[in-house]
Image: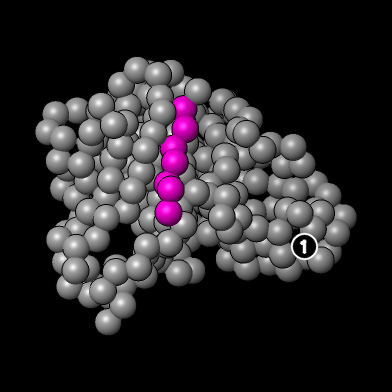
Amino acid sequence: DADVTQTPRNRITKTGKRIMLECSQTKGHDRMYWYRQDPGLGLQLIYYSFDVKDINKGEISDGYSVSRQAQAKFSLSLESAIPNQTALYFCATSEAEIAGFGELFFGEGSRLTVL
Amino acid sequence: AQSVAQPEDQVNVAEGNPLTVKCTYSVSGNPYLFWYVQYPNRGLQFLLKYITGDNLVKGSYGFEAEFNKSQTSFHLKKPSALVSDSALYFCAVRASGGSYIPTFGRGTSLIVHP
């Protein structure tokens, strides 16, 4: 089983619909992240969480919200999806600073298409 | 502010030849540097990192990277490329202090020809 699991892996939806992407991890890491990948743009950080009670906006948080339900679960929501949110979304985890140097462990990705 | 530049969108190399994927960075203070690889339809996988110490860092799958502080570079290298090395490669940097969030480059597509 994968250490970082994302569901769904693929989703097609319509403009205006609410979408939730879920992420769960078995690595025991405190830190979790949501990234968006667009061709030629690399990875852009949407939100990150250093523990259950900590949520922080990344560089492109507008139009997105997150929930950290437990140490192992971090969900990304699009309240009203729009076509330019069509992208590949990645969840990632890392150890706390005291335990490591911050290399990230990624899920397999969730491909979202908004029509 | 921290940033990463990967000047080549694509690198082509023949199987068996050495390969280099370039990365330069900008960060305040000492850098932590990382390389990740993404195979088609997969998530990113950690390859190697530079934290401190020897400038030549060895990682997974025979890859290595050379840290050059004066040139602010962290180029990824492999002595003999394999077709299976064809993938998208990302360089990332973060400061040794501060928010601890890495910044990624735009990625370089490596194509190894048989």
In reply to whether residue A66 is colored magenta, the answer given is no
Q: What residue is at 42 percent from the left and 54 percent from the top?
A: B8
Front residue of this view, candidates B24 and B85: B24
Residue A111 occupies quadrant: bottom right
Q: What residue is at 38 percent from the left and 55 percent from the top?
A: B89
Q: How is the image coloured?
A: one colour
Q: Which residue is mark 1?
A: A114
Q: Would residue A5 appear left or right of B86 to someone viewing this image?
A: right
Residue at the limit of the structure toward the bottom, as seen here: B114
Q: Would residue A11 appear left or right of A74 to someone viewing this image?
A: right
Label 1 is placed on what type of residue? Val
Q: Position of residue B109 (x, y in %)?
A: 42, 62
In reply to whether residue B4 is colored magenta, the answer given is yes
Instruction: Look at the image and give the residue range highlighted in magenta.
Output: B2-8
Q: Position of residue B51 (x, y in %)?
A: 24, 31
Residue B77 occupies quadrant: bottom left
Disc 1 secondary structure class: strand
Residue A103 seen in render: no
Q: What residue is at 24 percent from the left and 60 percent from the top?
A: B19
Q: Would residue B71 appear left or right of B3 to someone viewing this image?
A: left
Q: What residue is at 46 percent from the left and 27 percent from the top?
A: B2
Residue B19 seen in render: yes
Q: A64 above or below A55?
A: below
